[in-house]
Amino acid sequence: MDLLSLVNRQLTATTIAKISAFLGESNENTTTALKSAIPVVFGGVIQKASTNQGVIELQNLIKINQYDGGILEKFSNLFEDEETVSDFISTGASVLESIFGDKVASLGNSISGISGIKAGSASTLLSMITPIFMSVLGKEINSQRMGVSKLAKFLISQKNSVTAMLPTEISKVLNEDNLGDFLGQTQNTALDDITEEPKEGKSWLSWVLVGCLLLGALYYWQSCRNMVSEMISTPNADTTSINSIKADSVVLPSVGVVNKILSTGAKLSFDEKSIENELIEFIEDSSKAIDKTIWFNFRYLRFETGSAKIDSTSMQEVKNIAEIMKAYPINLRIGGYTDNVGQEELNMKLSADRAANVRKALLSMGIDGTRLTSEGYGSQHPVATNDTEEGRAQNRRIAVRVTKK
């Protein structure tokens, strides 16, 4: 299966003409830009899939944004409504940043130089292509019932077709030499150790299946196999604790969804390891006392780059927190954090402004101001190393802690 071809099929001549008109660029230059932009996005996704945590984040991005292929049916009509296309691009930009981090601007400049379109148009084009690509990928994940390791192997297997399409200038930005190498995790767990198929001699389950075959219990054997398949397609593990995946104890990350009806009648849907679920569990557990060290991190709350303005497409978690506060008599403290890049004075201000804007958003949703406080902590209290982009991304966060329940 060639994912590049599947994505290219979505971009008909009519669609490209609409994209060109929206960008204010020529069809020829836009077509040239697309030939670079599509493998760029694909290359970034493959690079993201080079670690266990990266694959998990990809799965979550696809699920949270509902990239199941539905967008593909509507894309040709997208440009008929300005607000719709604006939201589409904004969501794409958020996902794009999750994949590339601080490389987005460099990639846009490279595509601009190659194709002749403006740098701003190139960045917008990348933001358009990302949801399309993720939707095609999400559709394949659903149809092929891909678990974590199947998804990683599938993406890495596409390396050659992607690198063949990448211009030299962009290959350097993406570090093409390492593209498609599975880097595993800090414990050096190999990808094969989290595969859906147990290795021969490494799992008692294999012997059980062989025993069943020898006994001729075909029906029972089939049931066992189906049970294994179901367990694999719905893995269980903490998405924030990658080190829990061990070679001798395979625990895959959870992608389960919790549906919760609050006492107010509000119906919420969120991940098992989401801030909403963690917060509700803490509130409802009377044995858990309020503690200044217990914080709950937003997973999908994003801001415009270098700004305290909340991305309009990432407000769902904030809305859910507002509903939770309406259903439970809790008070919250909102903390803003940055990485250690730049002057600490500016980091403190940015983190404080971002936390304050989350507070303002909650106030606008009907939460009493006396129940909310906010503060910025700058680069203090990092949760990961600041020596890597992945670590810095984790340190740029908004968190809350319960001050009254």
Image (cartoon, grey):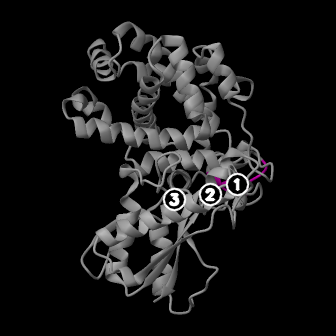
Q: Report which residue position mark 3 lands on.
A: 299
Please report contact status of discs 3 and 2: CB closer than 8 Å, yes or no.
no
Q: Position of residue 355 (x, y in %)?
A: 49, 66
Is 203 magenta? The answer is yes
Q: Is residue 158 above or below residue 375?
A: above
Q: Report which residue position mark 2 lands on.
A: 347
Instruction: Name which residue lies at 50% across and 92% down.
Output: 286
Image quadrant in which you'd find residue 228? bottom right
Q: Report which residue position mark 1 lands on.
A: 340
Q: Amino acid at mark 2?
A: Asn
- Which comes before the other along the chain, label 3 or label 2? 3
Tell me if 8 is positioned left or right of 155 in this view.
left
Q: Amino acid at mark 3?
A: Arg
Q: Which residues are magenta?
A: 201-212
Image quadrant in which you'd find residue 316? bottom left
Q: Position of residue 220 (x, y in %)?
A: 53, 57
Magenta region, main secondary structure: helix
Tell me if 193 is positioned left or right of 378 in this view.
right
Among all residues in the image, which is located at the extreme top? Answer: 28
Q: Position of residue 69 (x, y in %)?
A: 35, 36
Circle 1 Cα neighbour tier, 10 Å, few/some/many (<14 / 14–19 / ≥20): some
Q: Nearer the viewer, residue 320 or 354?
A: 354
Circle 2 Cα neighbour tier, 10 Å, few/some/many (<14 / 14–19 / ≥20): many
Please report contact status of discs 1 and 2: CB closer than 8 Å, yes or no.
yes
Is 266 magenta? The answer is no
Circle 3 Cα neighbour tier, 10 Å, few/some/many (<14 / 14–19 / ≥20): some
